[in-house]
Image (cartoon, helix red, strand yellow):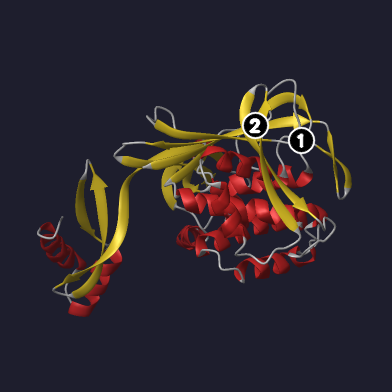
């Protein structure tokens, strides 16, 4: 499994990300050529060797002629969708801009359609975000992990005037993301950097994970701090683990005063809204009251919608949440020919061996079509798959 790790000990920004990529991980000419597929003009892409605290790094700069132009989200989406970039780059770039737009709209209490993407909508930020996913598409990592981000203090000058650090948009984006306090004045995490890492990261690096580092890249920020080297470090590694790892948020709440007929509706809505899993557990609360615990696993970027469902569709007035690490066997869904026609099965890999497993929905469909019980259908399908396992 190929793993990509963002070591954000001095924060993160769009130019630092691209600097780290072209430092040693992605050819600069490849990035430059791919960016030509999007209809952007009046800019030049430059990269220079530099040092921060005597550590060699790459400083990448986007030199723009028109720095005052602002755009709406629809303008940016059209620009990206009309490019000839890979679909992966298009979809993820737009997703990051939507994260930025959502939180800007919330902060200013306006519809997202009215948000002006001042610095974010400028050419340099479009290059930073689209360029990031061009590099990710080049590397094709199986999973991305990241370190906690530094939480600093002070102020920063922005399009809306002098703002506290972290900037309001950055603070909103980083809700539910792991942070660490750092006694420094100045902006180390930009809204663009926060939105990118929030979107791509599966969480912090799991404990006891054995990795073999292959390449490391260092991207330099604009300023040179006395306390720490202003660098972002990205490394690629391989792991021979039998399973894949990711980090999720687990959200829980105990309920003792709700009509039980509502629970199936809530579970279905949670799963349809991006939850990786959701389940119910019977428990006993204070005063000996029987209750039901709703538990939900989700990615960090889906946690807000999950909490909104729990607060709006159940009687809870509070939830618990915490990061969890998940180990999972490698799996994929494939179509195979069978006595019942083409059916979808799950292929699972462990210790270098693969096996095929029947899918519930397919067995249910076959049982309904044949008039057999689903138990009988499971037996027949699994007997067939035993002779098909690679």
- Closer-to-camera residue (35/104): 35
Residue annotated with mark 2: 231
Residue annotated with mark 1: 187
Q: Position of residue 228 (x, y in %)?
A: 69, 23
Residue that appears at 25% across and 56% down? 347
Q: Where is residue 278 in the image (x, y as percent from the top left)?
A: 44, 52
Q: Is residue 257 visible?
A: no
Q: Position of residue 270 (x, y in %)?
A: 51, 58
Asked if residue 50 is positioned above or below residue 267 in the image, the reply reads above
Q: Position of residue 115 (x, y in %)?
A: 79, 61
Q: Quadrant of residue 12?
A: top right
Q: Are marks 1 and 2 in contact (CB under 8 Å)?
A: no
Q: Few, some or many C-alpha atoms within 10 Å of disc 1 (few <14, some 14-19, many ≥20)?
A: many
Residue that appears at 43% across and 28% down? 207
Label whose residue precedes the other's in the sequence (1 or 2): 1
Residue that appears at 80% across and 65% down? 114
Q: Quadrant of the N terminus?
A: top left
Q: How far apart are marks 1 and 2 (CA)?
A: 13 Å
């Amino acid at each position: 499994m190929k793993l990509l790790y963002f070591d954000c000990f001095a924060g993160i920004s769009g130019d630092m990300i691209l600097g780290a990529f072209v430092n040693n991980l992605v050819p600069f000419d490849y990035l430059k050529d791919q960016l030509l597929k999007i209809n952007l003009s009046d800019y030049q892409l430059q990269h220079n060797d530099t040092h921060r605290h005597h550590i060699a790094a790459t400083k990448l700069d986007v030199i723009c002629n028109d720095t005052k132009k602002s755009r709406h989200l629809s303008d940016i989406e059209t620009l990206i969708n009309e490019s000839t970039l890979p679909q992966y780059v298009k979809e993820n770039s737009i997703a990051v801009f939507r994260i930025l737009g959502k939180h800007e709209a919330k902060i200013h209490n306006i519809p997202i359609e009215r948000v002006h993407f001042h610095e974010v909508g400028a050419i340099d930020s479009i290059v930073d975000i689209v360029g990031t996913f061009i590099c990710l598409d080049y590397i094709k990592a199986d999973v991305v992990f990241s370190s906690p981000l530094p939480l600093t203090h002070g102020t920063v000058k922005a399009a809306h005037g002098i703002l506290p650090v972290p900037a309001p948009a950055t603070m909103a984006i980083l809700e539910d993301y792991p942070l660490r306090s750092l006694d420094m004045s100045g902006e180390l995490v930009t809204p663009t950097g926060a939105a990118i890492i929030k979107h791509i990261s599966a969480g912090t690096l799991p404990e006891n994970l054995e990795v073999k580092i292959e390449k490391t890249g260092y991207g330099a920020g604009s300023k040179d701090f006395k306390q720490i080297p202003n660098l972002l470090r990205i490394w690629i590694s391989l792991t021979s683990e039998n399973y894949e790892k990711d980090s999720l948020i687990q959200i829980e709440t105990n309920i003792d005063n709700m009509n039980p007929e509502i629970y199936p509706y809530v579970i279905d809505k949670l799963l349809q809204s991006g939850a990786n899993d959701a389940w119910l557990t019977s428990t006993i609360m204070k005063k000996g009251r029987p209750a039901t615990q709703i538990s939900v696993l989700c990615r960090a970027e889906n946690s807000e919608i999950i909490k909104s469902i729990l607060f709006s569709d159940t009687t809870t007035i509070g939830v618990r949440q915490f990061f969890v690490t998940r180990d999972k066997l490698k799996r994929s869904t494939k179509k195979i020919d069978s006595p019942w026609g083409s059916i979808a099965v799950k292929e699972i890999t462990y210790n270098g061996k693969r096996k095929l497993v029947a899918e519930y929905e397919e067995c249910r469909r076959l049982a309904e079509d044949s008039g057999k019980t689903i138990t009988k259908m499971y037996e027949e399908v699994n007997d067939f798959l035993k002779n098909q396992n690679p």
